[in-house]
Image (cartoon, rainbow, N blue to C red):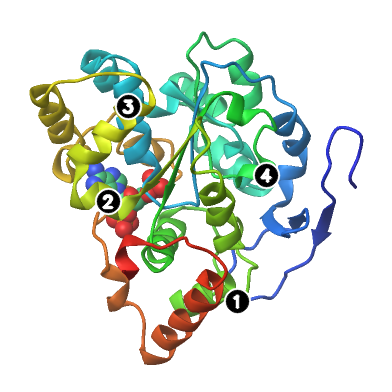
């Protein structure tokens, strides 16, 4: 289905019956790397790819559960001259347009969610905003526009690197544990299988947004591009002030030590978890998530060890080794 406006072939694939997957009617495989995405993404792919990009645009991008939200708020504050007043009062979901969010739900899920909110005007408005394609929201968004996506670089707007792109990567074992918890915290999401099954879908490249390593490597290959900043979640956990300085430099901002300390305090896990602007409690209010689950969950590195048995650990080592063989990409947690 490659066309004049879209250079990649989009294949609809049936993955029904595969354990460890959300029960979507179908999935897509896109382009030479075969990225997997929910079927609804076919309604977004071309518009996103050809989106008009402004040089002042700011993209924050990642494989899901790699520290996107944390990076988004850090980037937003650094670019917005540390405007805490707005950061605390305007939810992150309004400060950033999420390019493909609406395509992560099939019609049945959307209808169930709509019905939960249909009698409450305010909630319905929030719900409808979440399902509005990011490209439409951005048409009327004043600059600088902040944009979230989990798409790999090749499926992002083709001119994205004419703007600024911040990519955050995380040890895949932790990202996948976190992803599994997120999927399990969503109402109306029908996941077939346990963590091991979920993990296997990632290694076998059938989980949405995989192949994981291609996703990360595409960004890593551009890390020296003047408009690309490549971050690791593990570095943010280990030394957030240094990362804040790097991000500030990238955006041409200068902050003193006191300002950096305040920002790091604002971004600390404890403060983040209780900050309604970023903690996605909205998702509970709108019925997407169960009330007793957390979007900002543990905030640790290496927690994957509690989920992997010996066989999975060995398999993960092999998977990582094979995929890092042809690259100088090296995760801080694997040094
Ligand atoms: P865990 O589930 O391992 O706790 P994303 O925003 O890409 O969905 O990533 C979510 C992950 O980032 C979650 O990981 C979440 O807890 C973690 N996270 C979010 N804010 C954080 C913070 N301030 N400090 C450390 N980790 C954070």
Q: Which residue is mark 3?
A: 249
Q: Which residue is mark 1?
A: 19
Categorize mark 2 by other alpha carbons within 10 Å: few (<14), some (14-19), many (20+).
some
Categorize mark 4 by other alpha carbons within 10 Å: few (<14), some (14-19), many (20+).
some
Q: Which residue is mark 2?
A: 235
Indicate the position of residue 187 as horizontal and vertical percent values: 47, 53
| Earlier-in-chain disc, 3 versus 4 | 4
Q: Residue at x 61, y 37 (%)?
A: 100
User: Is 39 placed left or right of 115 in the picture?
Assistant: right
Q: CA distance from mark 4 to mark 2?
A: 25 Å
Secondary element at image label 2? helix
Q: Is residue 289 visible?
A: no
Secondary element at image label 4? helix
Q: Is residue 217 above or below residue 252?
A: below
| Earlier-in-chain disc, 4 versus 2 | 4
112 or 21, which lies in front?
A: 21
User: Is 240 placed left or right of 125 in the picture?
Assistant: left
Does the beta carbon at disc 2 come under 8 Å from ligand 1?
no
Indicate the position of residue 322 as horizontal and vertical percent values: 55, 77
Q: CA distance from mark 1 to mark 2?
A: 33 Å
| Earlier-in-chain disc, 1 versus 3 | 1
Q: Which residue is mark 4?
A: 154
Indicate the position of residue 198 as horizontal and vertical percent values: 51, 72
| Earlier-in-chain disc, 2 versus 3 | 2
Q: Is residue 305 above or below residue 224?
A: below
Question: Do the residues bearing badges 1 and 4 touch, measured as CB atoms within 8 Å?
Answer: no
């Amino acid at each position: 289905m490659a066309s004049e406006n879209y250079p990649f072939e989009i294949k609809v694939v049936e993955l029904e019956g595969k354990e460890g997957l959300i029960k979507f009617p179908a999935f897509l495989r896109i382009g030479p790397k075969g990225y997997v995405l929910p079927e609804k993404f076919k309604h977004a792919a071309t518009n996103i790819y050809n989106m008009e990009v402004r040089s002042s645009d700011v993209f924050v991008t990642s494989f899901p559960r790699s520290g996107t939200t944390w990076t988004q708020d850090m980037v937003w504050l650094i670019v917005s001259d540390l405007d805490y007043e707005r950061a605390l009062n305007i939810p992150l979901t309004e400060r950033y347009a999420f390019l493909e969010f609406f395509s992560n739900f099939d019609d049945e899920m959307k209808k169930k969610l709509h019905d939960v909110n249909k009698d409450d005007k305010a909630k319905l408005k929030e719900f409808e905003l979440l399902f509005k394609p990011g490209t439409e929201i951005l048409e009327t968004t004043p600059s600088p526009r902040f944009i979230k996506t989990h798409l790999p670089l090749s499926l992002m707007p083709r001119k994205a690197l004419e703007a600024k792109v911040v990519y955050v990567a995380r040890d895949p074992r932790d990202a996948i544990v976190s992803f599994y918890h997120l999927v399990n915290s969503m109402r109306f999401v029908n996941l077939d299988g346990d963590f091991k099954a979920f993990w296997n879908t990632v290694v076998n490249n059938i989980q949405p947004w995989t192949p994981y390593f291609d996703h990360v490597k595409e960004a890593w290959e551009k890390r020296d591009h003047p408009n690309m900043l490549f971050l690791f979640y593990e570095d943010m956990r280990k030394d957030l002030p240094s990362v804040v300085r790097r991000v500030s430099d990238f955006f041409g901002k200068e902050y003193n030590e006191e300002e950096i300390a305040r920002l790091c305090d604002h971004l600390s896990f404890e403060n983040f978890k209780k900050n309604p602007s970023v903690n996605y409690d909205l998702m509970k209010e709108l019925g997407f998530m169960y009330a007793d689950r957390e979007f900002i969950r543990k905030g640790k590195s290496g927690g994957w060890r509690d989920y992997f048995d010996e066989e999975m650990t060995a398999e993960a080592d092999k998977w990582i080794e094979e995929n890092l063989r042809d690259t100088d990409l090296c995760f801080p947690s694997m040094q």
